[in-house]
Image (spheres, coloured by chain):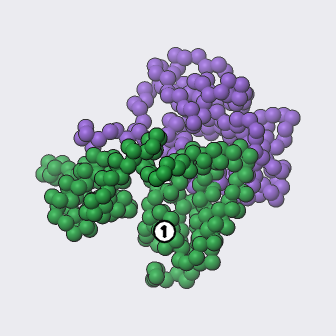
Chain colours: A green, B purple
Amino acid sequence: MTDGGAGYGDLDVLGVLNDPVRRQLYRHVAAAPGDVGRDAAAEAVGVSRSLAAHHLDKLVEAGLLAVDYRRLSGKSGPGAGRPAKVYRRAAGEYAVSVPPRSYDEVSRVLADVVERAGLDRELQTAARGAGEAAQGDPEAALAARGYQPFWDGAVLRLRNCPFRALSEEFPALICGMNLALVEGLAAGAEWSVEVDPCGGGCCVALQRTGEAGDGDKV
Amino acid sequence: MTDSSTHAPSSVPPSTPAHGFQLAQVNIGRFVAPADSPQIAGFVSKLEEINALADRSPGFVWRLVDGSGMDAMGLRPDSDDDLLQINCSVWESIEALKDYVYRSAHLGLLTRRREWFERLGERHQAMWWVPAGHRPTVAEAMAKVAWIREHGPSPQAFDFRDPYPMPTGRGNATAVSSA
């Protein structure tokens, strides 16, 4: 959801990330599989709890993080204490391009045409090829493309969907393209790739198919 | 979560009166080859599993089945077209249906739709609100597809892109076109 025009609104939002501590806190919370409390965020970044709280709330104010309240102790009822503030990445999307560019508009028009023409398989073939062209370890390749991979037991899940807005508009088309792209990235390595939505992130999950064992993750 | 400073998430369903409305949906598709051909075998082999997933999904109410009681593959919504398939079901909310269609293993099947189904040049799905307990017929469902093709999305027949909210009031007090 870029706010159109010359994108100055987005620039203001992203300007909030100029502070290095704030940027580290944002990165930590945005990549975390679940909500993050103030203590955990402060510890991850190596700053005091009060400094972390200050910056986290600035990020909420800017719309980059969303806040919720939860009892982190797991206790409930009287004596469980006050619910703590927890943070997660906000749903809004911001982009800044100088000079102004609008690739999202192009992608929407192209997706509409591909959808109408029923070219799912042709799109998947192209996406698989693009994935295969990438060199190196699939986990690193996924991270480099913004998927924010994390291990959920033996399953590699993806915290972020890089094609979010488009995939909500054209789910079958774009998720199919994405699946093929990830399959391409994982081709050659011993991985199984499947659609296994887990809420919030990318719907694709990967598992090593090599020798079952201690899960050495190089 | 009682704190008022956070917005209520949109996924929280509106309170549903005991005799309110439920969401009916129809989706038609034309096989690229006869149902018993090798081209369709991949789809057929997944059908039982994916229907079972629907049946146990939150908010699922009912789905249309043929004489086998298992699925709707034996139904012929167009007697002149042996390849045309119909899929019709009832859900508690648009969100519940969306969670199943796009946020479950069903999505994996959707990404392979062009292996099994022709691209239809016209709209092929419709949804509409029915009084709770109502079970659409094939004729009613096909009439909804015809309606949205002719009139575009409206409260009579809409889609995920242009949804219409659940009507207010008592569902059983409202006549439906097929009644």
In terms of depth relative to the viewer, which is nearer, A116 or B129?
A116
**Residue B94 in view (yes/no):** yes
Quadrant containing the C terminus of chain B is top right
Q: Which residue is depicted at the point 61% across and 68% down?
A: A131
Question: In the image, is residue B173 above or below residue B120?
Answer: above
Q: Which residue is depicted at the point 30% across and 53% down?
A: A16
**Residue B51 in view (yes/no):** no
B64 sits left or right of A141 in the view: right
| Local SS, label 1 | helix
Location of mark 1 (residue)? A144
Q: Where is residue A182 in the image (x, y as percent from the top left)?
A: 58, 65
Q: Where is residue B175 in the image (x, y as percent from the top left)?
A: 59, 16
Q: Which residue is depicted at the point 52% across and 81% down?
A: A212
Question: In the image, is residue A141 above or below residue B30?
Answer: below
Res A19 → quadrant: bottom left
Residue furthest to the left: A79
Question: In the image, is residue A21 above or below residue B30?
Answer: below
Q: In the image, what residue type sits under mark 1?
A: Ala
Residue furthest to the front: A99
Task: Tell how many labels.
Answer: 1
Packing grade of label 1 (10 A; few <14, some 14-19, many >=20) is few
In terms of depth relative to the viewer, which is nearer, A183 or A14?
A14
In terms of depth relative to the viewer, which is nearer, B139 or A145?
A145
